[in-house]
Amino acid sequence: MTDKPALRAQLKLLREELAARNPDAGETLAEKFPMRLLERYGPEVAGYMAIGSEIDALPLMRKLEKAGAELSLPRVEDDGTMTYRRWSPGEPLERRPFGLSEPCSSAPEVWPTLILTPLLAFDQMGNRLGYGKGHYDRALTRLRSAGRAFACALAYHGQLVDAVPAEDHDQPLDWALTEEGSFPLFMMRNMGAISAAGGRG
């Protein structure tokens, strides 16, 4: 059994080191983002407001908005459900528990189709290690049950690990964008599934 709390603590320290070495990562990722993803999976784009050593998503969000994206941010409601609320850079945000900055409850709820996500680690199969609250997994489950939802991680390349412990309820990533470039994860996942199916023959 993997000790996830210890793993999260270790990977949080790693991300802090990576952030110190790459203070302009948010700008770099905005430059490297493949705009075809917006064309294919937009225009409803969910970003996030970075906390701690998370990569700043604002440069990319501003770039996508100029290209026609309709932006939203996550909000954790009183019942623990994470929804997405309409938001545009410059609009006010509420200070919420755990240091989060979120749209107010009166902002319209939307259902984004391109979701930018922070994380602690990810692997080539699209498994994501978050903070253990399950907010993104439950939100992606809701979005994907209602239609398409393409999850793109914003990460330092050093957060790519050999394997992330995954459970049945975990929602996989489709794409990763790092300071070294971007690449699909669903193809790796599908190749793994094909290989496993072949091995059962």
Image (cartoon, helix red, strand yellow):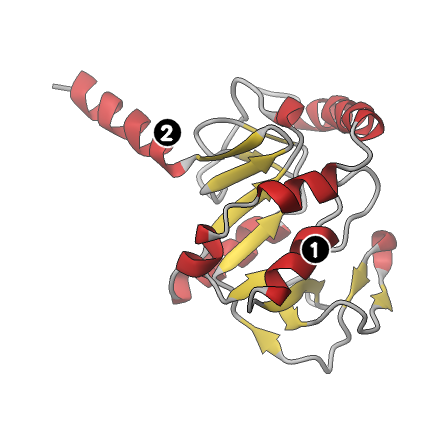
In the displayed structure, would residue 50 be above or below residue 145? above
In the displayed structure, would residue 55 be above or below residue 61? above
Of 139 and 87, nearer the camera is 87
In the displayed structure, would residue 199 be above or below residue 29? above
Q: Quadrant of the C terminus?
A: top left
Residue at image location 80% in from the left, 73% down from the top: 91
Q: Quadrant of the N terminus?
A: top right
Q: Tell me if label 1 and label 2 are in contact, CB under 8 Å.
A: no
**Marks 1 and 2, the one that precedes in the sequence:** 1
At label 2, the amino acid type is: Met
- Residue 67 in view (yes/no): yes
Of 185 and 181, nearer the camera is 181
Q: Is residue 7 left or right of residue 53?
A: left
Image spot of residue 32 (x, y percent): 59, 40
Q: Is residue 159 left or right of residue 190?
A: right
Q: CA distance from mark 1 to mark 2?
A: 26 Å
* Quarter of the view holding residue 97: bottom right
- Secondary structure of the residue carrying tag 1 is loop
Graded by Cα atoms within 10 Å as few (under 14), some (14 to 19) or many (20 or more), the crowding at tag 1 reads many
Image spot of residue 112 (x, y percent): 52, 65
In the displayed structure, would residue 9 be above or below residue 185? above
Point out which mark residue 188 bears: 2
Residue at image location 76% in from the left, 40% down from the top: 54
Graded by Cα atoms within 10 Å as few (under 14), some (14 to 19) or many (20 or more), the crowding at tag 2 reads some
Identify the residue position indicated by label 1 in the image: 48
- Residue 131 in view (yes/no): no
* Quarter of the view holding residue 132: top right
Of 95 and 41, nearer the camera is 41
At label 1, the amino acid type is: Tyr
* Quarter of the view holding residue 23: top right
Image spot of residue 88 (x, y percent): 71, 71
Residue at image location 69% in from the left, 23% down from the top: 7
